[in-house]
Image (cartoon, rainbow, N blue to C red):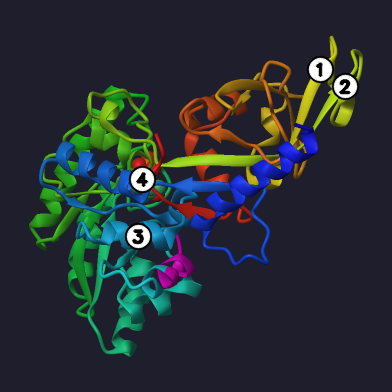
Amino acid sequence: MSRASRGDEFYLRTGRKGARVKRDMQQSLPRAWVEVDSEAIAHNLGVAQRVASGMKMMPVVKANAYGHGMEAVARRLDREKPAFFGVANAEEARRLEASGVSAPPFLLGPVPPQEREEVAQRGWGCTISSWEEALHFASLATQAGRVMPVHLALDTGMGREGIQPQELGELLPRLMELSSLRLEGVMSHCPAADEDENFTREQIDLFTRCVQEIRQYAEPRFVHMSASAGLLGYKVPGANLVRPGLMLYGVAPVPSTAATELQPTLRLLARVSLVRDLPAGHGVSYGRTFITPRPTRVATLGIGYADGWQRHLSGSGIAVSLRGTLCPMLGRVTMDQIMVDVSGVRDVVAGDEAELIGRRVTVEEVARRAGTIPWDIFTGLGQRLPRVYEPFRT
Ligand SMILES: *Cc1c(COP(=O)(O)O)cnc(C)c1O
């Protein structure tokens, strides 16, 4: 069979498989895409729920649900009745509401003045760190004719938001006088739950003491401190809500027995667009950082750094999986394309699917080789990549 006709035949096969993308026949199949297993994400939320034994859940779906697609992920997780969905800003909160889920959005970081009116009117969950924010929200809530729930953030060591514990004594009585605000929650965040156990234990003690002090003034409904690493590694006395992000997407930031139960949630795939034989001594990609040491069969794939396949992966020794074989990437990542060595794989043809993140090469390994963290790889996955929702084939 000629290469061209085998290519055609494969194209038909992919065409049929493409039916799951629900594209009309006029539209070409994508060159690169992301497959998401929503059931695996729900399973991982179940693991978080069990580890946190009975605490309420705030699944974190900011940054397009760590690249997995916020609306689809939130709709699936909403069936598990979370208390909130963690988002980063008003735009994400709006998108979340429009997706029709029943759990409200919670804005994780401080709310800049320009977003506050919308937050107060919509009644979204949010934090305050200062008297200035409290006063502003109180007047916006009064204007909107409602009592606004707020969560008081405590800076127990993160240095990103929250009031300093020693300022609590002065703030609390004044806060109680703002009748259009209701202290619905108390929260904090750990900067080193995956790196520094002594610090984290001291931080948890400090948080617990602060919560006791706050309870002399109010009964906050939600007390929360733990993201994935904190949840897996520590108990926070008095806390009743957790904010898992990364672990929902199958990656545990710290080793733990629960970590082994997490299921992978995402595969990154790209199609071979061309296969050629290059002679020895031929440069591959920009800067000619790679020169073929011998005659080499090279496949070009339709994915690049514009899709989130980071340029830092250039020269990192990363490989992609093609027909079950790991094929080393050659030379630099370009904006829309990469080249891989397929000399060791039989029958690779244009149209074949390569797996870049998934079973063979995990997101942790990609992050390590790019000199970054899995959060960065997930959230960097480009807008150009369609998200396809389906259980992973085995
Ligand atoms: C992003 C975020 C989380 C989730 O963190 P993971 O490490 O991904 O679990 C939790 N809390 C806050 C305040 C965050 O900003």
Res 74 label: 3
Query: What's under tag 4, amino acid-wise?
Result: Gly
- Magenta stretch bounds: 88-95
Q: Which of marks 4 and 3 is in front?
A: 3
Query: What's under tag 3, amino acid-wise?
Result: Ala
Residue 307 percent across, percent down from the top left: 65, 46
Query: What's under tag 1, amino acid-wise?
Result: Thr
Residue 36 percent across, percent down from the top left: 44, 48
**Residue 90, magenta (yes or no):** yes
Mark 4 and 3 residues: CB-CB less than 8 Å, in contact? no
Question: Where is mark 1, residue-wise?
Answer: 296
The number of discs equals 4
Question: Where is mark 4, residue-wise?
Answer: 245
| Among numbered discs 4 and 1, the one appearing first in the sequence | 4
Q: In this view, does 210 lie to the left or right of 117?
A: left
Residue 185 percent across, percent down from the top left: 20, 60
| Among numbered discs 1 and 2, the one appearing first in the sequence | 2
Q: Residues within 10 Å of mark 4 (few under 14, many from 20)?
A: many
Element on which disc 4 rests: loop
Q: Is residue 290 above or below residue 312?
A: above
Q: Is residue 28 left or right of residue 381?
A: right
Query: In the depicted view, which residue is nearer to us: 243 or 82?
Result: 82
Element on which disc 2 rests: strand
Mark 1 and 2 residues: CB-CB less than 8 Å, in contact? yes
**Residue 209, magenta (yes or no):** no
| Among numbered discs 3 and 1, the one appearing first in the sequence | 3
Mark pair 4, 3: CA separation? 12 Å
Mark pair 1, 2: CA separation? 5 Å
Res 278 label: 2
Identified at 84% across, 30% down, the residue is 285
